[in-house]
Amino acid sequence: MPPITLSTDFGPGSPYVAAMKGVILGINPAATIVDLTHAIPPQDVRQGGLFLAGVTHWFPADTIHVAVVDPGVGTKRRIIYARIGDQHYIAPDNGLLSRLTTRKQPLRVVSLDNSEHWLPEISATFHGRDIMAPVAAQISLGLNPEKLGARQPSLFQLNWPEPQVNPGGIAGTVLSIDSFGNLMTDIEQEHLRSVPAADLRIECGGEIIQGLARTYGEHSDGALVALIGSAGFLEIAVVRGSAARQLGAAVGAPVTLSW
């Protein structure tokens, strides 16, 4: 039986999370429910999309991922089921799954139109509990997603700009900031394979870093470093500190590489 994961902007300890779990277990008492995060910034669909793209592919095949970052709840925006790679996703169709599709196109997209698979009463403000949770539970019990509603040709797409790669450099962007204050960029390791690490010059927030570090611990406390993080992207960090605070950098800040 595949696990069901939950990713939301509800906040830790939220009663909304507990309600969704109650609905899932009421339909499938044997369900394994995994909390991925409930700390996505409120209504921040873009950060939710980055989170899903960064972690969900590590899960076993056929895992069911329910994602609720839904500022348009109750409006005409669709709720969809998507099969992307070997994973199932249930989410509002507001761009939350669009970062996933920059690497793999969906194998199937279905609009959750068939109310037979929802709770009997639907709140205008909590579709995560009343529509997405019961659908996830039923898929975990073997429901064919084709029965959820009509096939859709595509997902709603957010604009995900790519780094600008030139013969002598790259212009990228800070995509997110992790809990340590590390600046996570959109510049991939693949962009840098032909460049000696020592030759790289990284500029962000008015500071210049010469060369790539292999890991944090090879520099002293307080050092500003650039390295390839565990997800395969360039990140900027302060050893035992916060690069975001030291550089005054936010999501969207430019990062320039030259050699």
Image (cartoon, rainbow, N blue to C red):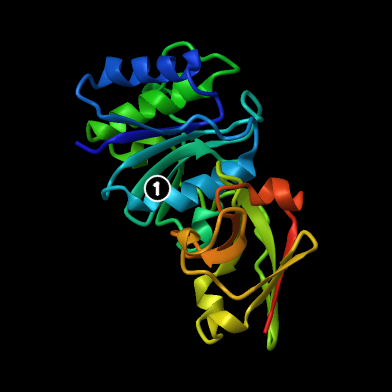
Q: Give how far across and how far down residue 185 sits, in percent.
A: 61, 60
Q: Give how far across and how far down residue 215 sits, in percent.
A: 46, 63
User: For this view, does 65 lie left or right of residue 140?
Assistant: right
Q: Give how far across and how far down residue 238 sits, in percent.
A: 61, 54
Residue 233 visible in the current orientation? yes
User: For this view, does 165 lie left or right of residue 198?
Assistant: right
Q: Which residue is mark 1?
A: 56
Q: Within the image, what quadrant is residue 134 found in?
A: top left
- In this view, the residue farthest toward the front is 220
- In this view, the residue farthest toward the right is 206
Q: Give how far across and how far down residue 104 sits, in percent.
A: 45, 62
Residue at 57%, 41% in the rendered image: 93
- Quarter of the figure with the N terminus: top left
259 or 97: nearer the eye? 259
191 or 131: nearer the eye? 191
Residue at 35%, 15% in the rendered image: 22
Residue at 25%, 29% in the rendered image: 32
Q: Is residue 103 above or below residue 139?
A: below
Numbered circles on residues, count: 1
- Quarter of the figure with the C terminus: bottom right
Residue 96 visible in the current orientation? no
Q: Is residue 238 above or below residue 33?
A: below
Amino acid type, residue under disc 1 in the picture: Thr
Q: Within the image, what quadrant is residue 164 found in?
A: bottom right
Binning the other alpha carbons within 10 Å of mark 1 as few (below 14), some (14 to 19) or many (20 upward) gives: some
Mark 1 secondary-structure assignment: helix
